[in-house]
């Protein structure tokens, strides 16, 4: 844990809280490494991971003041330097959050922009407040292609919505995000955290082996042919049922 990423375990749920509210929870590379390491070492007694944030915004993107590709700091980095210090850790994080051993939930208030949008929507479940706003503004703000975020979102949202976010660069609200399949549920801003707590507690009341079996299915089945999906579902069910 760092000062900017808080970890707390509550009755089977691991809460990961972004803690830079003074800057809209802009993400540093150090925070990304902490998130990755945390998700790679989830304890066996954890049944769900909840990612939320302090303050009015979920995450307004990466902190470019310390970004490897920020040429304003002086010497322009090489493509190899950018890939080693920035793109590789970010791709590793996206892979890690999708392959986590238990379901992941993001609780989104305010802005989820750029990396923040990808972080929120790469989770298995997205619970958004009615004031949440989602965007991929990189093309407009920095002239850079948001292909890293697209990597995280390509299997999470339909292609037309993703392309609209990329080229439109505008924010879409929670209701539109729900209609587009970008989020799972929308709750009143005032009761957003309460809803997340209740949801996490409900998941944690379910058998751990069934939870992990469902997560294993979600990780593997989308890349399979129908016969493979059926075989995987049958095998996971048999393993869990046979252990009762």
Image (cartoon, rainbow, N blue to C red):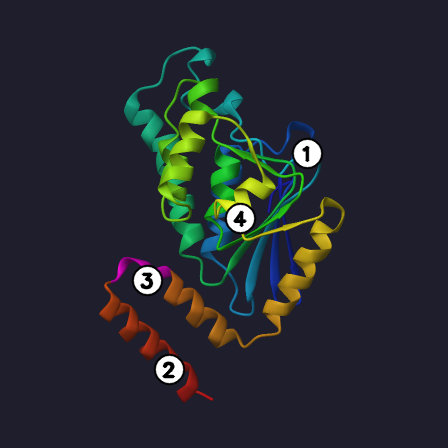
Where does the image place residue 127, in percent across and percent down from the top left? 60, 51
In-image side of 240 versus 233 (left or right): right
Residue assigned mark 4: 183
In-image side of 75 versus 102 (left or right): left
In the structure shown, which secondary structural element does the residue marked by tag 4 occupy?
Answer: loop
User: In the rendered structure, are the residues bearing label 2 and label 4 in contact, judged by CB atoms less than 8 Å apart?
Assistant: no
Question: For this rendering, which residue is in front, 39 or 219?
Answer: 219
Q: Please report the residue visible at 37 percent of the width from the left and 67 percent of the height from the top.
A: 217
Which badge, 3 or 4, is on the more N-terminal residue? 4
Which badge, 1 or 4, is on the more N-terminal residue? 1
Residue assigned mark 2: 239
User: In the rendered structure, are the residues bearing label 1 and label 4 in contact, judged by CB atoms less than 8 Å apart?
Assistant: no
Which badge, 1 or 3, is on the more N-terminal residue? 1
Q: How many labels does the image show?
A: 4
Q: Please report the residue visible at 23 percent of the width from the left and 70 percent of the height from the top.
A: 227
In the structure shown, which secondary structural element does the residue marked by tag 2 occupy?
Answer: helix
Dot in front, 2 or 4:
4
Q: Please report the residue visible at 35 percent of the width from the left and 32 percent of the height from the top.
A: 147
Mark drawn on residue 21: 1
Relative vertical location of residue 147 with respect to residue 45 in this rendering, above or below? above
Mark drawn on residue 220: 3
Q: Please report the residue visible at 48 percent of the width from the left and 35 percent of the height from the top.
A: 115
Span highlighted in magenta in the image:
219-224
Which badge, 3 or 2, is on the more N-terminal residue? 3
Which badge, 2 or 1, is on the more N-terminal residue? 1
Can residue 220 be seen at all in this image of the molecule? yes
Question: For this rendering, which residue is in front, 11 or 78?
Answer: 11
Dot in front, 1 or 3:
3
Report the Cα–Cα distance between label 1 and label 4: 22 Å
Q: Judge the density around disc 4: few (<14), some (14-19), many (≥20) Cα neighbours within 10 Å.
A: many
């Amino acid at each position: 844990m760092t000062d900017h990423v808080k970890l707390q375990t509550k009755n089977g749920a691991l809460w990961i809280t972004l803690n830079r509210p003074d800057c809209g929870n802009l993400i540093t590379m150090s925070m990304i490494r902490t998130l990755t390491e945390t998700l790679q070492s989830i304890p066996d007694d954890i049944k769900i991971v909840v990612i939320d944030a302090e303050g009015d915004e979920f995450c307004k993107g990466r902190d470019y003041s310390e970004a490897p590709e920020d040429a304003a700091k002086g010497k322009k980095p090489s493509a190899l330097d950018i890939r080693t210090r920035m793109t590789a850790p970010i791709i590793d994080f996206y892979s890690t959050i999708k392959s986590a051993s238990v379901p992941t939930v993001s609780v989104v208030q305010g802005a989820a922009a750029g990396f923040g949008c990808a972080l929120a929507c790469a989770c298995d479940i997205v619970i958004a407040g009615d004031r949440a706003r989602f965007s991929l503004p990189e093309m407009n703000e920095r002239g850079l292609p948001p292909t890293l975020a697209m990597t995280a979102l390509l299997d999470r949202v339909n292609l037309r919505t993703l392309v609209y976010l990329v080229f439109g660069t505008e924010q879409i609200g929670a209701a539109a995000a729900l209609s587009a399949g970008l989020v799972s549920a929308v709750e009143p801003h005032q009761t957003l955290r309460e809803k997340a707590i209740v949801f996490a507690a409900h998941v944690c009341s379910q058998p751990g082996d069934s939870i992990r079996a469902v997560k294993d299915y979600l990780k593997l089945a989308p890349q399979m042919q129908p016969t493979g999906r059926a075989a995987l579902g049958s095998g996971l069910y048999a393993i869990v049922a046979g252990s009762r």
